[in-house]
Amino acid sequence: MHSRTATTETIRQSFPALERVHNGYPVAYFDGPGGTQVPTMVTDAMVHYLLHHNANTHWAYPSSIETDQILDDSRSAFADFLNCDPNEIVFGQNMTTLTFHVARSLGRFWKRGDEILLTDLDHHANIDPWKDLARERGFVIRSAKFNPANGQLDLDHLRRLISARTRLIAVGGASNALGTINDLKTITTLARESRILSYVDGVHYAPHVLCDVQHLGCDFFACSPYKFYGPHAGVLYGNYELLERMNVPRLKPAGSHAPERLETGTLSHEAIAGSAAAVDFLASLTHAQSRRTALASTYHTLHERSQRRFTRLWDGLCNLDGVICYGPLPSESRTATLSFTVQGWTSEEACRRLSQNGLFLSHGDFYATTTVETLGVEGLIRAGISCYTSDEEVDRLIAAVANLKRTPKSGALQ
C-alpha cells in the first residue's frame, strides 16, 4: 500500500496555504484537529458548483437537476467513506447542529426519568445537546469517567452506569484533546446487547481512522469534513430504519423520507460538493479500482506516516524539562494529535510565541472542557499531524518549544 500512495511532498503541492510565510518563516499548520487546510481539488469543486450549477433542488430545469445529481453523488461518496447506503447520509451545517436535531427527535420517544449515558472524555458537542434535552424533558444524565494519567475511558465505569432506564450512549470515537481512540466496537456491542441506541461523535476519529459503520454497529455516526480537508459542513450517518421513523422537527412540504426528512431548509450545496471532493481527494492519493479500496490504502499509509512523525514529536517534547505531554503513549491506540503544557507559559501565550516562528497551533480546551478540567490545567497546547505535515516541520516545532523554555517571554507566567 505504501508504495502506491502519493508522497508527502506530492500531497503538499495540492495545498496553496502551505505557500504562506509569516515573519519570514514558512507556515507549518499544526492546527488540523481544529480544521485542516484545503486542497485545490476541494475549492475547485465548490467554485465549479457555484459558477455553473447553482440552483435550488427538485425543479425541472437543468441546473436544479444538476444540483440534485451533485447531492446524490455526494451521498454516494460518503456512503463509500463510511460503508453504508447513500440514503443513510444526512447533510447539515455542522456536527453540533445535527446532534441537537437528532437529540430533540429521539427525546420525543422517551419518558421522564429515562437516562442518557455520556463520557467525560467527549467534546461538548456530544455532551451539551443531550444535557439540554435532559433539562427540557426530565431525563437523567450519567457520565463515564476517564483516567487522567493515560487518557483512557473507564469502560468498567461505563458498564456500571447502564441501567434498565438507559436509552442512549453518546461517545466520541476519539478525543480531540488527548488523541485517545476509544474502543468503539466494545461500546456499541454493549449498547446493542442492552438494547440501547449508540451515537458516535466521529469528528476527531474520521480524519485518522477509516470508519466502517457496519462493522462498528453504531446507530448514528457524525463527522465534519473540515477536519479532513473539506469545507465547513456536517455529515451524519443514521440507520435507515431509524431515520424513517424518527419524529423529527420538519416542515410539512419538505421531503418525507430519509435522508431528506432530517435536512432542514436549504443546505449549503457548494459545501456538500466540496465535502464530497474531500473524500475524493483522499481516495485520489492511491490508485485503486474502487473508492473504498483507495480510501483504505490511503488511510493505511497516512496512518503509518503520521504515527512515525507523532512519535518523533512526542519523544522530542517529552524529553524537554518543564514540558508535560498528555494522553496515551504513541504505542497505544491514539490519533496523531499531541496536547502538552510548558511550565511558565499559559497555552495562549505559548501559541502566540510559537506563531511568530510560523508554527500555527491551537490552545485552550477545544470544547473538551470537562476533559481539561479533569486534568487540572488552565489549557492545553495542541499539535496535530496532518497529511501535509513534514519531518522538517516536526523538528522546527520541537526546537521552538525548547527555545520557549530557554527564553521565556515577559508576561508569561513565572
Image: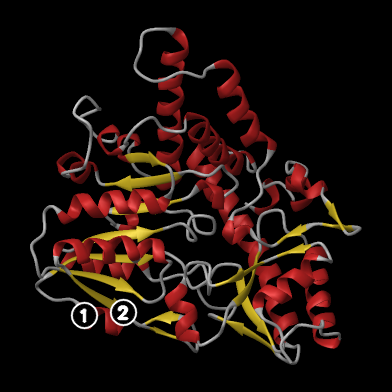
Where residue 380 sits: x, y (%)? 60, 77
Q: Residues within 10 Å of mark 1 (few under 14, many from 20)?
A: some
Q: Nearer the viewer, residue 203 or 268?
A: 268
**Residue drawn 81% across the image and 62% down it:** 358
The residues bearing labels 1 and 2 have C-alpha atoms spaced at a distance of 7 Å
Query: Where 57 falls versus 363 (above or below)?
Result: above
Q: Which numbered disc covers residue 144? A: 2
Where residue 321 sits: x, y (%)? 75, 92
Q: Residues within 10 Å of mark 2 (few under 14, many from 20)?
A: many
Q: Quadrant of residue 357?
A: bottom right
Left or right, 179 with reference to 117: right
**Residue drawn 50% across the image and 85% down it:** 375
Which quarter of the rendering shows the C terminus? bottom right
**Residue drawn 34% across the image and 74% down it:** 119
Mark 1 near mark 2, Cβ–Cβ under 8 Å?
Answer: yes
The reply to whether residue 212 is visible in this rendering is: no
Query: Where 43 falls versus 201 (above or below)?
Result: above
Three-letter residue code for mark 2? Ala
Q: First in sequence, mark 1 or 2: give its number.
A: 2
Left or right, 303 with reference to 196: right
Q: Which residue is mark 1?
A: 161
Where residue 291 sits: x, y (%)? 51, 38
Q: Which numbered disc covers residue 6? A: none
- Quick one: SS at disc 2? strand
- Quick one: SS at disc 1? helix
Residue positioned most to the top: 61
Three-letter residue code for mark 1? Leu
